[in-house]
Amino acid sequence: MAQALIASRQTVLPKRLAEPGPDAQQLQQLLQALAAAPDHGELRPWRFVIVPQARRGLLADAFEAALRDRDAQATPAQCADAREKAYRAPLLMLAIARLGPAQPDMPALERMVSMGAALQNLLLLAHAMGYGAALTSGQSLQSPRLRELFRLQPGEEPVCFVSVGSITQRKPMRPRASPHEFVSEL
């Protein structure tokens, strides 16, 4: 069962996600899946910030401001596109890695592995619930506007947005790499 779930999971971009999204109970289950990730030292070297619908306008403002900071010549259509990204998925969260000094001292790469495992747990459980999900990034993640909006502390880095919702359109499954393409023996 787990193998079939893993093999059938695919990214569904936020523009292909719609209501309904996870209800309150399902959201709690998704958040518990995050907590089940491997976490050497029990550091929880990550955190997630949910962006509720009522606060999406603030995120839209930050996306537009980040675009204008990068490109003073951004057209109104480009600004509208940047803003629209804040409204796509019913459930939207920012995944944040805690890479600053930690006790016990754990290498940043090990902490990122924990973050990746937490994200995969969430993606697989969302898929098992019948939802589509995606991890998205972009230039706005490095924007001071975004750092300010999400109150990122020194040593915290935004990794990606997590979008979850009902699938409106599926793309065909893309071929998966064969293990011989990425595994070797010592």
Image: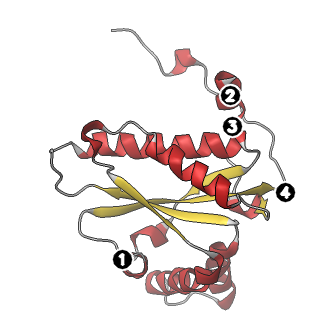
Q: Residue furthest right?
A: 168
> How is colour applied across the structure in the image?
secondary structure
Q: In screen coordinates, is 77 left or right of 144?
A: right
In x, y percent, where is residue 122? 57, 46
Q: Are marks 2 and 3 in contact (CB under 8 Å)?
A: yes
Q: Are the residues tagged 4 and 2 within 8 Å (C-beta)?
A: no
Dot 1, how many residues are within 10 Å of its Cα: few (below 14), some (14-19), or many (20+)?
few
Q: Which mark is residue 7?
A: 2
Tell me the residue that label 3 is attached to.
Answer: 9
**SS category of the residue bearing label 4:** loop
Q: Is residue 6 visible?
A: yes
Label 4 environment density (alpha carbons within 10 Å; few <14, some 14–19, many ≥20): few
Mark closer to the observer (1, 2):
1
* Amino acid beneath label 4: Thr
In the rendered structure, the answer to whether residue 94 lies left or right of residue 124 reads left
In terms of secondary structure, where does tag 3 sit?
loop
Q: Give me the residue at 82% from left, 48% from top.
A: 170
The residue under label 4 is: 168
Q: Are marks 1 and 4 in contact (CB under 8 Å)?
A: no
Q: Specify which label sits upstream in the sequence, 4 or 2.
A: 2
